[in-house]
Image (tube, rainbow, N blue to C red):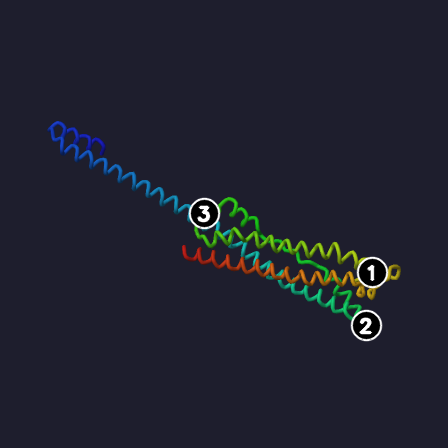
């Protein structure tokens, strides 16, 4: 093909057709430029296609983690509701003068009412996508929501840590000053428990009141985290479906 074009040029020069030669050479240059532009367009299209495929893979992995987290948070919400209810019931016992028949309730409530739900979310894939592959995400709403997801997680975990501190550093030491922990299940004759003294402990009542108040923030942070995650799930599912 190159030899063919060279022959044409040589023939034009030999026949002194300089005007036609210049027009032909210009046309040849235009064809070369068009060819280069087409090649660049194809390469650009291939690059964009690879990026979109990579984006689909990243979004699918993030979606999988978010759906797993939603299941974990739904279970945690049920447990938190139960723990809040148990805290309220403990305070109700402490605000009255319970009969001996209600001491069994105190034992059961103490066994479960001082727990703190500790959730372990799937964050490695999400954090890796944010740190290393966020530029692949073209949907700005998904990008913003994804970047802010760990902020909601941290807000919840901070409140969870506060709940643990109230329980382990304030409530449990005072409970242990009144009862032998193993007496929650089996009464000891050597170390009898003073449930009435525990239920009359004003400082302990204040700690349980703090736990109840902070539980409201705890539950609110969990609901905010769930809502943000659910919205992100919807956005990613819409994006994936629109590209099928």
In the image, taking residue 237 as reference, residue 90 lies left or right, namely: right
Q: Quadrant of residue 162?
A: bottom right
Within 10 Å of disc 2 (Cα), the crowding (few <14, some 14-19, many 20+) is few
Residue in the picture at 25% in, 37% down: 32
In the image, taking residue 197 as reference, residue 216 lies left or right, namely: left
Instruction: Identify residue for label 1.
Output: 178
Give the percent coordinates (x, y) of residue 120: 62, 53
SS for dot 3: helix
Lower sequence index among marks 1 and 2 = 2
In depth, the one of 62 and 100 nearer the eye is: 100
Residue in the picture at 76% in, 69% down: 95
Give the percent coordinates (x, y) of residue 66: 54, 55
Q: Nearer the observer, disc 3 or disc 1?
A: 1
Question: Which corner quadrant holds the C terminus?
Answer: bottom left
What is the CA distance from the residue labelled 3 to the residue labelled 2?
Answer: 65 Å
Residue in the picture at 81% in, 65% down: 200
Marker disc for residue 199: none
Lower sequence index among marks 3 and 1 = 3
In depth, the one of 68 and 213 nearer the eye is: 213
What is the CA distance from the residue labelled 3 to the residue labelled 1?
Answer: 59 Å
Within 10 Å of disc 3 (Cα), the crowding (few <14, some 14-19, many 20+) is some
Instruction: Identify residue for label 3.
Output: 136
Residue 112 visible, this orientation:
no
Instruction: Identify residue for label 2.
Output: 99
Residue farthest left in this picture: 15
Give the percent coordinates (x, y) of residue 182: 81, 59
Question: Relative to 48, is 217 above or below?
Answer: below
What is the CA distance from the residue labelled 1 to the residue labelled 2?
Answer: 18 Å
Residue 109 visible, this orientation:
yes
């Amino acid at each position: 093909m190159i030899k063919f074009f060279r022959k044409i040029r040589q023939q034009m020069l030999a026949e002194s057709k300089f005007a036609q030669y210049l027009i032909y050479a210009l046309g040849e240059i235009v064809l070369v430029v068009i060819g280069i532009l087409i090649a660049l367009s194809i390469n650009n299209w291939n690059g964009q296609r690879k990026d979109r495929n990579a984006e689909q893979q990243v979004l699918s992995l993030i979606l999988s983690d978010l759906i797993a987290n939603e299941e974990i948070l739904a279970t945690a919400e049920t447990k938190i509701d139960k723990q809040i209810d148990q805290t309220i019931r403990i305070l109700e016992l402490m605000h009255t003068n319970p009969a001996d028949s209600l001491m069994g309730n105190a034992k059961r409530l103490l066994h479960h009412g001082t727990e703190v739900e500790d959730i372990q979310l799937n964050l490695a894939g999400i954090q890796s996508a944010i740190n290393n592959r966020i530029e692949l995400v073209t949907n700005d709403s998904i990008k913003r929501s994804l970047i802010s997801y760990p902020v909601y997680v941290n807000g919840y975990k901070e409140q969870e840590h506060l709940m643990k501190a109230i329980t382990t550093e304030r409530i449990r030491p005072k409970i242990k000053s009144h009862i032998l922990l193993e007496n929650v299940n089996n009464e000891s004759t050597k170390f009898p428990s003073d449930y009435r003294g525990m239920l009359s402990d004003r400082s302990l009542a204040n700690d349980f009141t703090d736990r109840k108040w902070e539980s409201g923030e705890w539950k609110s942070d969990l609901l905010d985290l769930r809502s943000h995650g659910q919205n992100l799930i919807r956005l990613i599912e819409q994006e994936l479906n629109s590209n099928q």
